[in-house]
């Protein structure tokens, strides 16, 4: 009696979950559940030729790139991915206690991506790091063709070369000094695409206008920025592997902006320059950012230079056009021979000590510099005893890729300054940073 009752309850649950006919009892009293796709195929096999298919089967995939559910034809897709970065920062010889030794969650980002109706892609990326909830990306990308797409929402501005690298692919813990002069994430509309099989890629759009090094969630004035980037990879489709990974580009912005002015941070994320309290942006801001890169097997190198020119105001009668510049040179090499392409590395042998496999190892080196316009100090727009006139950085990092999804980074960055202290130069920063990352 009890067995019969359990059988009836189980049968009812199967019908509720999978529909009528989903369950049947085998000779040994085991419930056999038909997959959803199998039932749909049987139903469609019996339908008239002029009738639309019912319940087209879906595909479910889970791999190193995330978790995906999609329709049979790919017109509808939902992908769940994300990354988590746990960092440690320590500042050696920090007599002035300018940096705070700490452990922190640098990025905590679940990522929801998808396609609705074949041509429409979306992305929603919140970030819960540092005890805050922030929307990093939220946009709709319409694919008319490979050569013409329209993106609307919040996403990375198309300017800085290193900034456009995905945060999970960084081979160093923090980006170089040029990130202080390029806009980070902004809200706007962008046209973008690729021509000639990827030989030419372009981005052009209008945005609210984030300050140098900053992101923007809501505009504070009527001014807007026109932004664009053109990147050429002339040998991308060549049969020669030597020059296949060579690329050169130019990016820039222009627009009239009022209000907020930026602060500049070291690679160790400590502020070394800020304008006076009465200083505001008050006029045209123009950025120019030439860039070049080269990828070949385990090697990745790039360089970029950025100039940011902004009209500033200190009082009703005092204005100044200031121009700040920054550059960096970067190289990374996978010592174990795997291919390195913009930070993605898949070890030939993922971490498995029992089999003598320990993943992949990469080495990265970088030098960068940022120079503040001397006119800013001469006109009293910044205090030379508190803000540095320039900063020079060099650093080295070791990456250990245990799997495609898990890696550790250890880096050392030294930054020296001109000015920034009451009597002489600001104390050099010696930042030791560690990162544990999982991404999928």
Image (cartoon, rainbow, N blue to C red):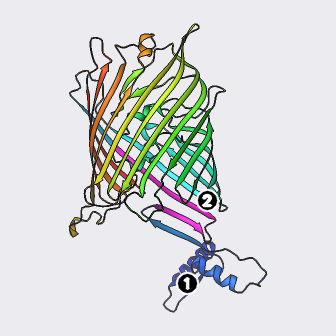
Q: Quadrant of residue 359?
A: bottom left
Q: Residues within 10 Å of mark 2 (few under 14, many from 20)?
A: many
Decide: is 172 above or below 369: below
Q: Residues within 10 Å of mark 1 (few under 14, many from 20)?
A: few
Spot the residue most to the bottom: 27
Q: Secondary structure at mark 1?
A: helix
User: Mark 1 vs mark 2: which is more N-terminal?
Assistant: 1
> Which residue is found at the position 44% from the left and 50% from the top?
247
Decide: is 186 above or below 422: below
> Which residue is found at the position 44% from the left and 37% from the top?
131
Mark drawn on residue 4: 1
> Which residue is found at the position 74% from the left and 84% from the top?
47
Q: CA distance from mark 1 to mark 2?
A: 46 Å
Q: Quadrant of residue 39?
A: bottom right
Reply yes or no: does residue 78 show up in magenta. yes
User: Which portion, as a residue range, is magenta?
Assistant: 65-86
């Amino acid at each position: 009696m009890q067995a019969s009752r359990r059988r009836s309850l189980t049968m009812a649950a199967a019908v509720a979950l999978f529909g009528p006919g989903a369950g049947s009892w085998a000779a040994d009293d085991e419930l056999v559940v038909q997959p959803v796709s199998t039932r749909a195929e049987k139903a469609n096999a019996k339908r008239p030729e002029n009738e639309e298919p019912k319940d087209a089967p879906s595909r479910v995939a889970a791999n190193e790139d995330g978790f995906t559910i999609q329709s049979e034809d790919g017109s509808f897709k939902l992908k769940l991915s994300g990354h988590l970065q746990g960092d440690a920062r320590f500042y050696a010889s920090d007599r002035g206690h300018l940096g705070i030794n700490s452990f922190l969650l640098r990025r905590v980002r679940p990522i929801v991506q998808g396609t609705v109706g074949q041509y429409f892609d979306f992305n929603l990326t919140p970030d819960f790091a540092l005890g805050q909830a922030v929307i990093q990306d939220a946009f709709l990308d319409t694919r008319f063709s490979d050569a013409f797409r329209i993106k609307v929402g919040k996403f990375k501005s198309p300017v800085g070369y290193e900034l456009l690298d995905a945060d999970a692919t960084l081979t160093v813990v923090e980006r170089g000094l040029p990130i202080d002069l390029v806009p980070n994430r902004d809200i706007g509309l962008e046209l973008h695409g690729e021509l000639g099989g990827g030989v030419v890629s372009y981005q052009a759009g209008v945005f609210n206008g984030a300050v140098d090094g900053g992101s923007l969630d809501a505009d504070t004035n009527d001014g807007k920025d026109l932004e664009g980037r053109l990147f050429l990879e002339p040998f991308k489709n060549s049969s020669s592997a030597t020059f296949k990974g060579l690329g050169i580009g130019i990016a820039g912005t222009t627009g009239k902006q009022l209000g907020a002015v930026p602060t500049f941070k070291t690679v160790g994320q400590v502020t070394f320059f800020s304008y006076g309290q009465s200083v505001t942006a008050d006029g045209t801001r123009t950025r120019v950012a030439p860039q070049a890169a080269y990828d070949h097997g385990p090697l990745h190198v790039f360089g970029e230079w950025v100039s940011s020119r902004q009209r500033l105001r200190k009082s009703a009668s005092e204005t100044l056009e200031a121009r700040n510049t920054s550059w960096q040179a970067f190289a990374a090499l996978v010592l174990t021979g795997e291919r390195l392409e913009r930070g993605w590395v898949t070890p030939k042998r993922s971490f498995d000590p029992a089999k003598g496999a320990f993943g992949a190892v990469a080495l990265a080196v970088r030098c960068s510099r940022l120079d503040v316009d001397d006119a800013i100090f001469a006109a009293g727009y910044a205090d030379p005893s508190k803000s540095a006139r320039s900063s020079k950085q060099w650093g080295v990092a070791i990456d250990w890729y245990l799997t495609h999804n898990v890696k550790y980074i250890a880096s050392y960055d030294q930054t020296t300054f001109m000015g920034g202290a009451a009597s002489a130069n600001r104390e050099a920063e010696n930042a030791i940073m560690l990162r544990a990352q999982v991404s999928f």
